[in-house]
Image (tube, grey):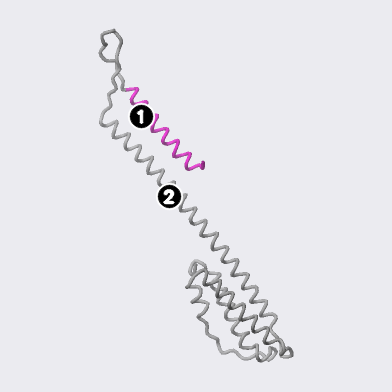
Amino acid sequence: MNLAGQSVLSALRVVLLRCTRMAKCQTTSANRNASGQSRKEVTISSYDVSMWIMEALVVLLVGYEVIHGRLRERTEGKRHTQIEKRQSALFDLIARGRALQRTVPSSREVARVDSWCSSVDAWKKDVRGLLESYSQKAVAAFDEFSIEDQSRDFRIAPGAWPHHVHLAGLIEKLVSIAEKPECYF
């Protein structure tokens, strides 16, 4: 049992001990019965009862707050773990995207353009599928993309240039999503 549960149990023990001590203190010797033995009567005032009820309510309130706090911590811990896993998966996809960026075909490697472009399309499909399993907000942010007017880099093969620019923008979007998980997940 954890520390909070032990403190609630010890508070309950204290309340019960007080109740029994109060009852013992208020026992008085009363009339003797026919055999000469004394009979004990327990007198409990309404003030004593109200104090017991108040103490019991305080213990219940403390117990509720402890249990509620533990449940909230547990929920937040699960959410934090889930977000960390999602971020890890996104950072893996970002690394794959950056690897694709580094392997863009040069202007001398025109034969490799089609396979590289299909790799970019497959990466984009993987990212979109992962984001769809997480949140529609993330998919919308990822799909909201506008290509800025960039001057063409002549070192990159002509057929690969549009995919390269698009890939760079998508990686930036994915980084933005991964850095602000509380907005999207």
Residue 158 vertical position relative to residue 8 in the rendered view, above or below: below
Badge 1 marks a residue whose secondary structure is helix
Residue wearing tag 2: 68
- Name the residue rendered at 63%, 81% in the picture: 120
Circle nearer the N terminus (1, 2): 1
Q: Nearer the viewer, residue 144 or 119?
A: 119
Badge 2 marks a residue whose secondary structure is helix
Please provide the residue range marked out in magenta. 1-25
Most extreme residue toward the right is 108
Tell me the kind of residue under disc 1. Cys
Residue wearing tag 1: 19
* Pointer 1 with pointer 2, Cβ within 8 A: no
Assign the magenta stretch its main secondary structure: helix
Image quadrant of residue 165?
bottom right
Q: Residues within 10 Å of mark 1 (few under 14, many from 20)?
A: some
Where is residue 1 drawn, in percent x and y?
51, 41
Tell me the kind of residue under disc 2. His
Any mark on residue 89, and which?
none
Q: Nearer the viewer, residue 11 or 104?
A: 104
Where is residue 142 drawn, in percent x and y?
53, 77
Where is residue 156 drawn, in percent x and y?
68, 88
